Amino acid sequence: MRNLDAWRALRAPFLTGLALSAALLLLPLTALGEPPAGADAPPSAGLLTLPAAPTPVPASAPPPGEWDASQTLNLLGRDGQVSQTTMGDYLWGVVAAEMPASFEPEALRAQAVCARTYSLWKLRAKSHEEDGADICADSTCCQAYLSKEDAAQRWGEGTASAYTAKIAAAVADTDGQVLTYEGGPIQAVFFSSASGATEDAAAVWGKALPYLVSVDSPEGEEVPNYRSTVTLTAEQVKKMAAEAGLDCDLSGEPSGWFQNLTRTASGRVASVDLGGIALSGGAARSLFALRSACFDVKEQEGVFTFSVTGYGHGVGMSQYGANAMAREGAGWRDILTHYYTGAQLQTGL
């Protein structure tokens, strides 16, 4: 990656990288930004006190695109081929893939900074050094990525031109801006939608990070499929548990299979016993293919109904929460400093 040799020499292993990577393998997240689905509903009341207007860009900001255009990286595509691209072009593809282009401009700008920051964090982790690449286009490993051609096909002729320009502006307007903590890029994870509050990283991945703690998030019923339901028969639950290698005792009545459900401070399931085996909320979410770990489970006549709120792992920036904040007047800096407690913004690294 041209012009990044200086800071590459300073790379140090980031202790939480392995923990997050392992967790991502266990959770069906595509969790670094999951696409919305369904119809819109009336917005709920906001939970935050927001500024009256977006924070203005300081006069000392670099010309749009200058820093991002000066950085090149090797991108491992989903086809296994490695290609070279600029940071700016790569970020355009990430924002297009990870956040709906219909979102507010300030939310898209916040997403661009998250994508840039997470990219630099991954580069320091050297995740794809053996592949001859800096980063990949797989959302289960790095971040989702769309080429301009694929994005235009997804959006359709009526909106492709406007959305292309809108995302380009979001990247250029935040050129080189990186979220840092104690001098290094943060693990700027994000997800789709929260159930009133984000989650503490320690509750999901077992490793506390000072900038990934629970904060209020203002989205609600306006989020497509904000509330979802998964229905499973007792036989399906037995089969899933067996396929996962869980030594559960499911010989009794189904009404007694799920016990001792506890919650985190944000309302997500911390743990639940299934046939005497304790599962974390994230493990239960993965096992039963739930949209989030914020769920209730009820049994009636051998059928289990999981009532779920929100979508994603819940850590870091909520994308729909960012959009709700932007609609109420928050700027991208306000959004980022809200969701990443104590993180600082700086230009480049």
Image (cartoon, rainbow, N blue to C red):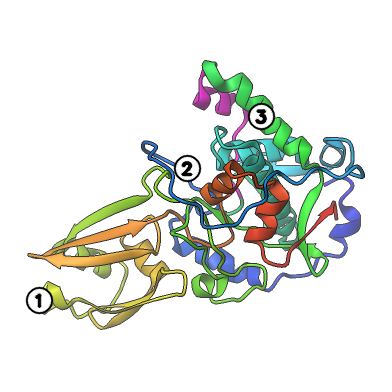
Bounds of the magenta span? 143-156
Report which residue position mark 3 lands on. Answer: 166
For residue 307: magenta?
no
Q: Which residue is drawn at 26% across and 55% down?
A: 230
Q: What residue type is labelled 3?
A: Lys
Report which residue position mark 2 lands on. Answer: 35
When the figure is inspected, residue 349 is found, relative to residue 329, above or below; the finding is below
Label total for image: 3
When the figure is inspected, residue 40 is found, relative to residue 318, above or below; the finding is above
Q: Which-is-in-front pick, marks 1 and 3?
A: 3
Q: Which amino acid does label 2 sit on?
A: Pro
Q: Residue at x 38, y 64 (%)?
A: 294
Q: Distance between the residues labelled 2 and 3?
A: 18 Å
14 left or right of 199?
right
Residue 211 visible? The answer is yes
For residue 150: magenta?
yes
Q: Residue at x 55, y 32 (%)?
A: 102
Label disc, if present, on residue 253 of the rendered structure: 1
Q: Mark 2 or 3 closer to N-term?
A: 2
Q: How crowded is mark 2: few (under 14 residues within 10 Å), some or many (20 or more)?
A: some
Residue 342, x across and y down, in percent: 72, 67
Query: Which one is in front, 76 or 228?
Result: 228
Residue sitting farthest toward the front: 52
Residue 104, x across and y down, in percent: 60, 37
When the figure is inspected, residue 156 is found, relative to residue 7, above or below; the finding is above
Whether pointer 2 and pointer 1 mark residues with C-beta atoms closer than 8 Å, the reply is: no
Q: How crowded is mark 1: few (under 14 residues within 10 Å), some or many (20 or more)?
A: few
Q: Distance between the residues labelled 1 and 3?
A: 55 Å
159 left or right of 297?
right
Residue 28, x across and y down, in percent: 43, 56
Q: Which-is-in-front pick, marks 2 and 3?
A: 3
